[in-house]
Amino acid sequence: MDFRDDVNLDASQVQDTGGRGGGGFPGGSGGMVIGGGGVVTLIAFIVLALLNNAGGEPEPAQRQPPANLAQQCRTGKDADQSEKCQVVGVVNSIQDYWKTELPEYTLAKTVLYSGGVRTACGAADSSVGPFYCPGDQRVYLDLTFFDQLRSQFGAQGGPFAQAYVIAHEYGHHVQNLLGGLEGGSSVATELQADCYAGAWTKNAYEGGFYEKQFTDADIAQALDAAAAVGDDRIQRRSGGRVDPESFTHGSSKQRVAAFQRGYDTGDPDRCAPAGLV
Ligand SMILES: [Zn+2]
């Protein structure tokens, strides 16, 4: 999924906070405080990450200064060469799509963090995966998540799996703008976000950020990631019994089908939650 070398990136859509700043979080137990009326939507694997982390010492965070993305990520060529610039390229493409698709769309920043981050939805540390916070309308991303996707969840990983995860989180931003998150997160809203990710995937090439149409191999990576983070798969891997009552993201099969619906139709209007659950 190469970016076009000469396409200009808008690095202001992504903010790098660098490593954990002074202070850290009290407790450091891997907890997530949900407050301020915000609904936090998290990828389901977090549940497992929290369980795995319980009682363990948090990994010592690297203290890195924030990257100057405006300087480092100017064009698609930069996006092909650095992971952070690749995130900028993906975020730019996703938001470019939604701006044309949805008149009421407003830009939402992605915040890259490592170690810990404070949000309007509470404090999060590294064990928390990618999430969207409606309270401050930002997507939060710790890049080590993508290593975990491979090692803990058995996904093949790869750049397109990463793009899918980011597109899913922006799907929650779209839901927030449309009032769809008012009842909180549910299987239906999660599947709709997957469907939105599929719709972007179908239309991304038209936006001019990418060199070529996505290939079947790219799509396979996304579907593989979607399947890997299905709740049934996660519960099996964590040794738990599969209990549909506790599903929050949908089964692997449902998630793949939801992504596929968006991809096949290329039309977010076909992503009504009622048709996906
Ligand atoms: Zn989600």
Image (spheres, rainbow, N blue to C red):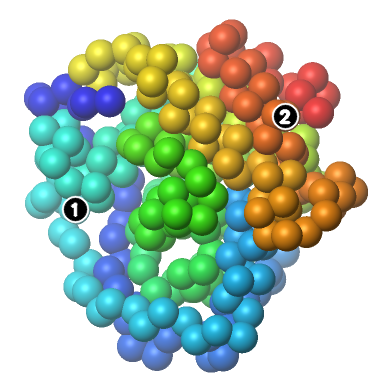
| Residue 47, image quadrant | bottom right
Residue extending farthest top: 265
* Residue 254 numbered tag: 2
Residue 117, compared with residue 187, is above or below; it is below
Residue extending farthest right: 245
Residue 97, compared with residue 44, is above or below; it is above
Residue 261 place in picture, x, y as percent: 64, 16
Q: Quadrant of the C terminus?
A: top right
Identity of the residue drawn at 27% across and 36% down: 89
Q: Secondary structure at mark 1?
A: helix
Observer-nearest of 163 and 33: 163
Badge 1: residue crowd in 10 Å (few <14, some 14–19, many ≥20): some
Q: Secondary structure at mark 2?
A: helix
Residue 235, compared with residue 190, is above or below; it is below
Dot 1 beta carbon under 8 Å from ligand 1: no
Q: Is residue 52 left or right of residue 214?
A: right
Badge 2: residue crowd in 10 Å (few <14, some 14–19, many ≥20): many
Identity of the residue drawn at 19% across and 53% down: 69
Observer-nearest of 219 and 271: 219
Q: Amino acid at mark 1?
A: Leu
* Residue 69 numbered tag: 1
- Spatial separation of the CA atoms under disc 1 and disc 2: 36 Å
Of circles 1 and 2, the one toward us is 2
Residue 157 place in picture, x, y as percent: 40, 41
Can residue 259 be seen at all in this image of the molecule?
A: yes
Q: Is residue 168 left or right of residue 82?
A: right
Identity of the residue drawn at 86% across and 45% down: 244
Q: Amino acid at mark 2?
A: Gln
Residue 162 place in picture, x, y as percent: 40, 40
